[in-house]
Amino acid sequence: MPVEVANESEIAVDEAELTGICRYVLAEMGVNPMAELSVLCVDPDYMSVLHERWMGEKGPTDVLAFPMDELDTARPDDPEPGPALLGDVVLCPSVAVRQARAAGHSMDDELLLLATHGVLHLLGYDHMEPEEEREMFGLQTRLLEGWRAAPRQPVTGEPAERGPGTR
């Protein structure tokens, strides 16, 4: 699954880990492996501009998701589906640092949570209503627990291949 991570913020982030969690979430959610995703880390000023422009709210936020309107880019007569552009997840590491301190965990853990949250938004999940919130946050928790429990390759950090009969 092509996942592009770009860090344009003033804070160093683990781009490989962000790529890994996004690939893991997309695979667990059954998204076509040809789907493409972009993750952008930005500074608080730019996040504030995006937040006000798209959500009508002042100040920076932690994560924004911008889904593409068209998920199927293949021609109708093409027997193989083409790559789909899922959209963009925009993260603000500065906000993640504050939230991580308040929650008592690392910024990296907060960014994993926010990336998972953003990908779920791209896939159509929301938390405006109590039932939607329970579903989305429950799924988010299960995905993060699965990511943390998955064995990793020692060099790349990518999930290790699972043997036959394992999930």
Image: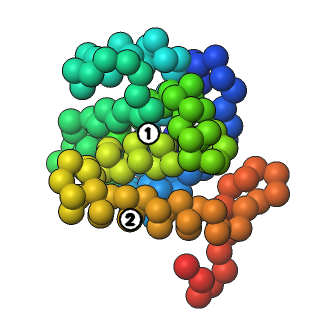
In the image, farthest residue toward the bottom: 165
Residue at left offset 51%, top offset 21%: 42
The numbered disc on residue 75 is none
> In terms of depth relative to the viewer, which is nearer, 89 or 75?
89
Residue type at mark 2?
Gly
Q: Is residue 118 above or below residue 66?
A: below
Q: Residues within 10 Å of mark 1 (few under 14, many from 20)?
A: many
As helix, strand or loop, the secondary structure at mark 2 comes to helix
Residue at left offset 31%, top offset 17%: 58
Pointer 2 residue = 138
- The quadrant in which residue 61 appears is top left
Pointer 1 residue = 37
As helix, strand or loop, the secondary structure at mark 1 comes to strand
> In terms of depth relative to the viewer, which is nearer, 89 or 167?
89
In the image, farthest residue toward the front: 102
Task: Say which label, 2 or 1, has the lower sequence index.
Answer: 1
Residue 135 position, x and y percent, is: 29, 64
For residue 37, say whether it is visible.
yes
* Mark 2 vs mark 1: in front: 2
Q: Is residue 1 above or below residue 42?
A: below
